Amino acid sequence: MTTLAYPPPLDDGVIRVRPWHDGDLRCVEQASQDPTIPLGTTVPARYTEEEGRAYLARQHARLTSGQGISLAIARQGADEAVGHINLMTRPQRGVAGIGYWIVPAARRQGLAPRAIALLTAWGLGAGGFARVEAWVEPDNHASQRVLELNNYLLEGRLRSFLTLGDRRADVLVYSRITADPAG
């Protein structure tokens, strides 16, 4: 069985993937202002400092509860958090789900593909997972491109699979396994 632990510092010279800290509240505030991020995550829809701190506490609790590993995506130089990435355990042994978001002001800068490359490589290597999968809404073409850039393969569609806000949503299932080539 995979033992959950934070990975060592992961960076590629442009971004770092690291545990969340109190200095990341601005990132949580920016994410809460996006109309879609709070719908499918635990980001508060109405930001207050108290809600922001509660969000950070939930991210750390994922590791201690065995749910998964939740990390900030930060710019390398200033260590400014601009997004979120996680590996959440699935009921099947050796399987993790990857999830991610980038605050609107930092999108279209190639940060998400970099973060996914770093965490997927760690997850399928030292992290001990045999499979990493992602669930993406069919209309989220940007997320699909990010996964495809990292050699995730489209496996199919799960109808009415997730609840997002007050609606049901289909998802496309993408995956990488240890035998697949790196992105």
Image (cartoon, rainbow, N blue to C red):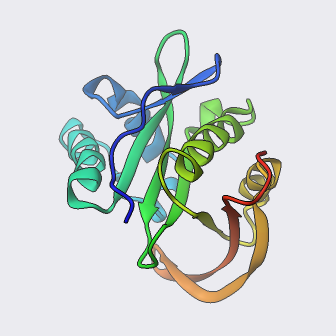
Q: Is residue 47 left or right of residue 57?
A: right
| Outermost residue toward the left in this view | 50
Direction bottom: furthest residue = 159
Locate the C terminus by quadrant.
Answer: top right
Residue at the image position 79 percent from the left and 66 percent from the top: 153
Q: Does the rendering let one see residue 65?
A: yes
Q: Quadrant of residue 62?
A: bottom left
Q: Residue at x 75, y 68 (%)?
A: 139
Note whether 61 is above or below 40 in the view shown.
Answer: above
Foreground pick, 76 / 159: 76
Residue 180 at x, y = what percent? 77, 58
Location of residue 151 (image quadrant): bottom right
- Up/down of 12 relative to 54, above or below: above
Q: Residue at image x 57%, y 63%?
A: 130
Furthest residue to the top?
77
In the rendering, at what x and y percent does residue 131 appear? Answer: 59, 65
Q: In front: 141, or 16? A: 16
Q: Number of numbered discs present?
A: 0
One can see residue 45 in this view: no
Q: Position of residue 35 (x, y in %)?
A: 53, 54
Could you tell me which quadrant the N terminus lies in? bottom left
Q: Would you say 160 lies left or right of 176 here?
A: left
Q: Position of residue 103 (x, y in %)?
A: 55, 38
